[in-house]
Image (spheres, rainbow, N blue to C red):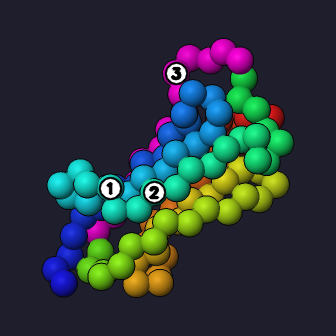
């Protein structure tokens, strides 16, 4: 397979959680996951200017794409694996995203 460019977008959704999507060069979603703040006992502030988001663009030569996340004491880490090897990471830090 030739090298392709992908984009990992992580964004807050109506202050209820986080959506993470991996897009290919044609803007088609190739992997997706969601996190509900409630599942982790978290809440976003009632008001803020805009919703936090983060984007990582990467190029890789893989046949499979997998998107996973994990929670640690300070935030969420979203990892993209291509053929089982990590190819991109975005961190949603509780302090930066104003989540309690």
Please name the residue that numbered disc 3 is placed on. 50
The label number, if any, that marks residue 32 in the structure image: 2
What segment carries the magenta color?
46-59
In this rendering, position of residue 17 left or right of residue 39: left
Decide which of tag 2 and tag 3 comes sooner along the chain. 2
- Between circles 1 and 3, the one closer to the viewer is 1
**Count of all numbered marks drawn on residues in the image:** 3
Looking at the rendered structure, the secondary structure element under dot 2 is strand
Is residue 3 a member of the stretch shown in magenta?
A: no
In this rendering, position of residue 19 left or right of residue 82: right
Q: CA distance from mark 1 to mark 3?
A: 24 Å
Q: Residues within 10 Å of mark 3 (few under 14, many from 20)?
A: few
Is residue 52 a member of the stretch shown in magenta?
A: yes
Please name the residue that numbered disc 1 is placed on. 29
Residue 62: image location, x then y, percent: 30, 81
Residue drawn at the location 72% of the way across and 23% of the way down: 45
């Amino acid at each position: 397979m030739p090298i392709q460019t992908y984009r990992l977008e992580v964004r807050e959704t109506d202050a209820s959680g986080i959506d993470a999507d991996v897009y290919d060069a044609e803007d088609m979603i190739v992997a997706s996951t969601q996190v509900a703040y409630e599942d982790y006992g978290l809440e976003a502030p009632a008001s803020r200017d805009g919703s936090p988001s983060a984007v990582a663009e990467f190029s890789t030569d893989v046949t499979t794409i997998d998107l996973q996340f994990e929670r640690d004491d300070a935030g969420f880490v979203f990892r993209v694996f291509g053929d089982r090897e990590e190819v991109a990471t975005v961190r949603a830090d509780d302090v930066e995203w104003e989540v309690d």
